[in-house]
Image (tube, grey):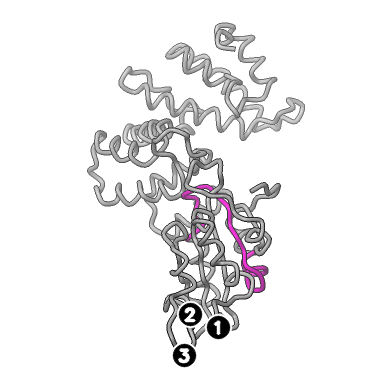
Amino acid sequence: MNIPITVNQTELLDVLLNVAVTRPVFIWGAPGIGKSSIVESFAKSIGLPCVSMLGSQLAPEDIIGVPQILDGKSVFCPPRMIARDKPYCLFLDELNACSQEVQKAFYSLIHDRRIGEYFLPEGSIIIGAGNRAQDNAIVKPMSSALINRMFHVELIASHRDWLEWAGQNGIHPHIIEYIGLRPDHLWRQPPKTEEPFSSPRSWHMLSDAMISYGNNITDKQLEILASGCLSPHHATQFRAFIKQIRNRYALSAIINGDQKWPNKPEDRDALYFLAQSFKAQLIKELPLDKNNLSGASQDLAFNAKSLMKDLANISLEIAQMTVSTEEDSALPDWFVVEVIRDLPRLAAKK
């Protein structure tokens, strides 16, 4: 599905409140970003029970029902899950994962809000959801007839929305703090290989597991949990973040000069995490145009150059990665030029 505009959780709730009450809505999005939980929260907020059906596990008769003979005539009896007396929210999850025959069975339900002689109660809402073709999930082409019967919207993961939700739902405080520092690690495009990948759902799973283990969780246990839920790179970074907390390293203290970079070989993973967090903060705080430097950002740039020198003395490789422009995010060009002018050896990886 090609939709040029995406929405976050807040915007999606607004769409559902204004559109779903009159027209069926289909939510596209990657696995694990919260489509199901958002629909359930929406239904609860407007006082409707939410009835979920998983498209990938349905047969046509699960929707249209089975025929019975009544007064010499055959009558299709829709399933009890659908045939209700009071209005409700019908959530058709993984709708684009069901077979073409099942999709056909949904036509009259979605377009006319009826199955045979049964009509959904006035005030009922129909919402569908599914993964995208690029997500390496089980998806099947949706017919143009079914697509044209629904309003379509694509959901993306928003770290701000997720952090607000996490703070209200008992997510482990270390995870909340980590995503606050590295919002780009909340979600990763599902890989083509069979391996765990980061998503709001996988961070929730990791939180539950960490809470279950308790405060005495060992480094090895944390490694097992993070590796079983997150993208490999994110898992490594999260373990380094926990190690940083346990060793009382703080990026703010390092920037202010109250602490030094960790320089022991056994702290190399913590050093790497701190360096990446340092880079993320510089990208956030330093303007693209040097002429727009404020007093605070000018002080940060000055301190950062000295810190880059100290970092290079501990690990040239990590320092080179910090100023590298090969990644999606890069430091302002003027800052990189000034750092490399003072430390030419950092240009080796350019």
Kind of residue at badge 3: Gly
- The residue beneath circle 3 is 72
Mark 2 lies on a secondary structure that is strand
User: Looking at the picture, how far across and down is residue 311, in whole percent?
Assistant: 47, 17
Looking at this rendering, what residue extends furthest in the bottom direction? 71
In the rendered structure, does residue 32 fall within the stretch colored magenta? Answer: yes
User: Looking at the picture, how far across and down is residue 192, in whole percent?
Assistant: 47, 34
- The residue beneath circle 1 is 117
Q: Rounded to the nearest whole Å, what is the CA distance between mark 1 and mark 3?
A: 16 Å
Q: Rounded to the nearest whole Å, what is the CA distance between mark 1 and mark 2?
A: 8 Å
- Asked whether disc 1 touches disc 3, contact meaning CB atoms under 8 Å apart, the reply is no
- Asked whether disc 1 touches disc 2, contact meaning CB atoms under 8 Å apart, the reply is yes
Instruction: Let me know if residue 269 appears in the view.
Output: yes
Describe residue 229's horizontal placement relative to residue 288 as left or right: left
Kind of residue at badge 2: Phe
Q: Residue at x 68, y 49 (%)?
A: 3
- The residue beneath circle 2 is 76
Describe residue 239's horizontal placement relative to residue 319 as left or right: left
| Above-or-below relation of 40 to 136 | below
Answer with mark 1 or mark 3, whichever residue precedes in sequence. 3
Q: Nearer the viewer, mark 2 or mark 3?
A: 3
Comparing 305 with 51, the one in front is: 51
In the rendered structure, does residue 330 fall within the stretch colored magenta? Answer: no
Q: Residue at x 66, y 15 (%)?
A: 338
Region of the chain picked out in magenta, as a range: 15-36
Kind of residue at badge 1: Glu
